[in-house]
Every structure is written in structure tokens, then in C-alpha cells.
């Protein structure tokens, strides 16, 4: 099995980062391991093993001058590999990526079970959620697949931001206005790296947040949130999530 912890090559020392825990969930085989490899290490693994329990990888990005570390927790899709780990990886979560395979509708139909598992583990609606349709490179016209419209409808109903991508080939061609960093005139075609779009969207969303993860967890418990027992001020690295 590959190393559990990987760093983005240009950001291996990250002492002053705020760290955010992002869990990646979805049915077995949808491509969670490949996705997290691509998001964090920029490559597609040759032969990913089925994840046993949980594995995590890290990526540090610069968002408007602030370094943000995303800690991606790649969770096992297979029930038999999950049981003992579930409570651990749902602790202090800042964001969730729900993954389905665009070419395999059963994995899309499996999403409500993952949403329910999050709910049962006290992840409220206010935790940022992203819906990721994987394996876009395998889309074939006319095949029985999950359409973008279907996915968009689901994402909107559940307050998720939708991305369709491919860990194998994350670049797609687009025609139209470039974003503000792209500097292209309207109508010009350009390539977009969908993985980078995901990383930046997650990082930017989390960077805006100022609440503690415990605020989410303790909602409905006693209406308050944990602070260090000895009265220490909260450290920047402990800050998190939604607002
Ligand atoms: N063509 C293509 N194949 C992919 C892509 N992403 C993953 N795969 C393949 O799909 C299979 C499963 O990928 P994994 O990343 O191991 O899936 P997983 O969701 O982590 O599976 P579990 O660990 O069992 O939960 C592997 O054979 C990958 O090579 C993709 O973007 N395109």
C-alpha cells in the first residue's frame, strides 16, 4: 500500500497553516483513493488497493496570501473495512466530499446512505459539502450514466457544490470566459484542471470560516462548544469551518 501521508511538493513545511480535515466518502470503487491522490499529489496511482479503514493525504494551498492545509481522509467504501474506524474519522470534520461514479448510477443512488451516515455522526447541514462525480473520462454518449442535471438537482437539494471530474484525466476543454486568473478574452477556448478547481473551492470555502469544529459537533448536545480546559487562547490551527 502507498504511503499514508503525502505532501504537495512545494509546500512540505507548513508550520503556520490552518489545517482543515476533509473526509471523502462514497461507495467502494467510485475512485476516492485516486481522487485524493490526484488532489494531493497531482498524479493517478497505477494500482490503488481497496482502502482498509482510513488513509489520509495532505495538500497545502495558498488562498489569497494565506496558507491553508487540507487534510483529506480517504475512507473505505467497503463496509467490512469501515466498522472499527467510523467514529474516528467523523470526529472534528470541517468539510465532506461525497463521491459517486458518473458511469455507475448505483453509486449515485448510494449517496443518501452516506448523507445519513454523516447525519448520524453529528455532521450538521452547516458543514460545507461537495459532490464529486468521478471517472468523467469514461463517459460515453447514450450510455446509462448519471447526468449532470440529475447530479445538479441532488447537489442543490442538499446544499452541496457539484464538480464533475476525472482523476485519470482531470483536464477538460472549455469555451468561454476564463476566470480572473486566466486572463482570456470571452469566447476563447482553454483547458481547465478540474482537480485544481476542487482544491481551490474547498480551500477558499474553509478559509472563510471562523468557527470551531466542535461547534458543529456539540450542536444539540448542550448548545455550546469546547474550548481548551486550561483557558489557553484558541490557536489559529484549530480554527475551522462554516459560517
Ligand atoms: N478511468 C478511470 N478510472 C478510475 C478513475 N478513478 C479511479 N479509477 C479506477 O477505479 C478503481 C477504483 O478506484 P479507487 O480509487 O480504489 O476507489 P475507492 O473509492 O477508493 O475504493 P474503496 O477503497 O474500495 O472504497 C481503480 O481501478 C481505479 O484505477 C478515473 O478517474 N478514471
Image (spheres, rainbow, N blue to C red):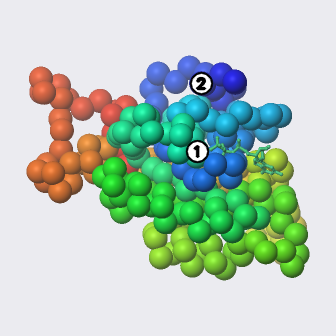
Dot 2 alpha-carbon crowd within 10 angstroms: few under 14, some 14 to 19, many 20 or more: some
**Relative to the observer, which residue lies in front, 152 or 68?**
152
Dividing the picture into quadrants, the one containing residue 75 is top right
In the displayed structure, 46 sits above or below 216; it is: above
Looking at mark 1, is its residue's CB closer than 8 Å to ligand 1? yes
Residue at 41% over, 46% down:
94
Is residue 58 visible in the rendered image? The answer is no
**x and y percent of residue 141 in the render?**
88, 75
Instruction: Look at the numbered disc 2 and give the secondary structure of its residue.
Output: loop
Dividing the picture into quadrants, the one containing residue 83 is top left
Residue 5 has which mark? 2
- Tell me whether the residue at label 2 lies in contact with that at label 1, contact meaning CB atoms closer than 8 angstroms: no
**How many labels, in total?**
2
**x and y percent of residue 238 in the render?**
33, 34
Looking at mark 2, is its residue's CB closer than 8 Å to ligand 1? no
**x and y percent of residue 171 in the render?**
82, 54
Question: Which residue is denoted by mark 1 in the rendering?
Answer: 78
Dividing the picture into quadrants, the one containing residue 164 is bottom right
Is residue 12 visible in the rendered image? The answer is yes
Amino acid at each position: 500500500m502507498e504511503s499514508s501521508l503525502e505532501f504537495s511538493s512545494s509546500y512540505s513545511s507548513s508550520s503556520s497553516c490552518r489545517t482543515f480535515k476533509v473526509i471523502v466518502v462514497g461507495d467502494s470503487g467510485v475512485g476516492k483513493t485516486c481522487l485524493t491522490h490526484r488532489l494531493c499529489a497531482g498524479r493517478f496511482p497505477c494500482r490503488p488497493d481497496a482502502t482498509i479503514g482510513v488513509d489520509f493525504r495532505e495538500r497545502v494551498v495558498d488562498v489569497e496570501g494565506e496558507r491553508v492545509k487540507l487534510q483529506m481522509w480517504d475512507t473505505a467504501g467497503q463496509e467490512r473495512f469501515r466498522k472499527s474506524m467510523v467514529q474516528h474519522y467523523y470526529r472534528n470534520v470541517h468539510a465532506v466530499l461525497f463521491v459517486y461514479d458518473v458511469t455507475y448510477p448505483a453509486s449515485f443512488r448510494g449517496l443518501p446512505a452516506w448523507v445519513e451516515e454523516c447525519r448520524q455522526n453529528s455532521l450538521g447541514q452547516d458543514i460545507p459539502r461537495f459532490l464529486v462525480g468521478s471517472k468523467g473520462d469514461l463517459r460515453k454518449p447514450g450510455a446509462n450514466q448519471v447526468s449532470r442535471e440529475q447530479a445538479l438537482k441532488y447537489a442543490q437539494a442538499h446544499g452541496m457544490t457539484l464538480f464533475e471530474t476525472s482523476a485519470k484525466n482531470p483536464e477538460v476543454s472549455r469555451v468561454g470566459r476564463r476566470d480572473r486568473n486566466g486572463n482570456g478574452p470571452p469566447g476563447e477556448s482553454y483547458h481547465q484542471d478540474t482537480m485544481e478547481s476542487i482544491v481551490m473551492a474547498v480551500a477558499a470555502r474553509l478559509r472563510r470560516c471562523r468557527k470551531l469544529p466542535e461547534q458543529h459537533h456539540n450542536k444539540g448536545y448542550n448548545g455550546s462548544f469546547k474550548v481548551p480546559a486550561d483557558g489557553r487562547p484558541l490557536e489559529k490551527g484549530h480554527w475551522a469551518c462554516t459560517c
